[in-house]
Image (spheres, grey):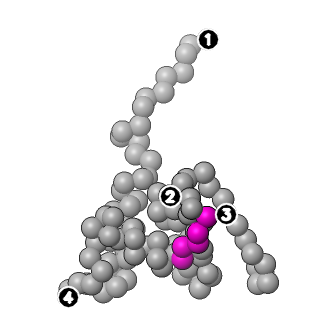
Amino acid sequence: MSRGFRIALMCAEKEPVECHRTILVARHLANREIEIQHILATGELESQEDALRRLARAVKVPENDLFRSAEELLAETYRRQEKRIAYDTERAPAFRVAAG
């Protein structure tokens, strides 16, 4: 359905690897073999693959591992970043509704 079209999902995040669209949406689009390009603050484009390699280095997941597959390392990269940027109800401020 989207063949022949370019789709842009925009976000206010300056850094693509900090954005939920990279971690959630682009992840699933890439699994469907859709090309993902992130626009960096410099205006340059970065592929999803390059963004994930950079993210793996940032969250200290090795590029290669004797005992884990590339898919397992990628899953670990996502897991670590999800833990860093996901909304956490235990750390969220409590909201109180004022009585009428």
Mark sitting earlier along the chain (3/4): 3
Q: Give the range drawn in magenta.
A: 43-47
Between the C-alphas of marks 2 and 4, the distance is 31 Å
Q: Do the residues labelled 1 and 3 touch (CB within 8 Å)?
A: no
Residue tagged 2: 15
Instruction: Identify the disc placed on residue 66.
Output: 4
Q: Give neighbour class at mark 4: few <14, some 14-19, many 20+ (Cα, 10 Å).
A: few
Type of the residue with mark 1: Gly
Instruction: Identify the disc placed on residue 9.
Output: 3
Mark 3 or 2, which is nearer the eye?
Answer: 2
Q: Is mark 4 on a helix, strand or loop?
A: loop
Between the C-alphas of marks 3 and 2, the distance is 14 Å
Count of numbered labels shown in the rendering: 4
Instruction: Identify the disc placed on residue 53.
Output: none
Q: Farthest residue to the top: give it.
A: 100
Which is nearer the eye, 95 or 72? 72
Image quadrant where residue 55 sits: bottom left
Q: Position of residue 59 (x, y in %)?
A: 31, 64
Q: Give neighbour class at mark 3: few <14, some 14-19, many 20+ (Cα, 10 Å).
A: few
Mark 2 or 1, which is nearer the eye?
Answer: 2
Is residue 25 visible in this depiction of the protein? no
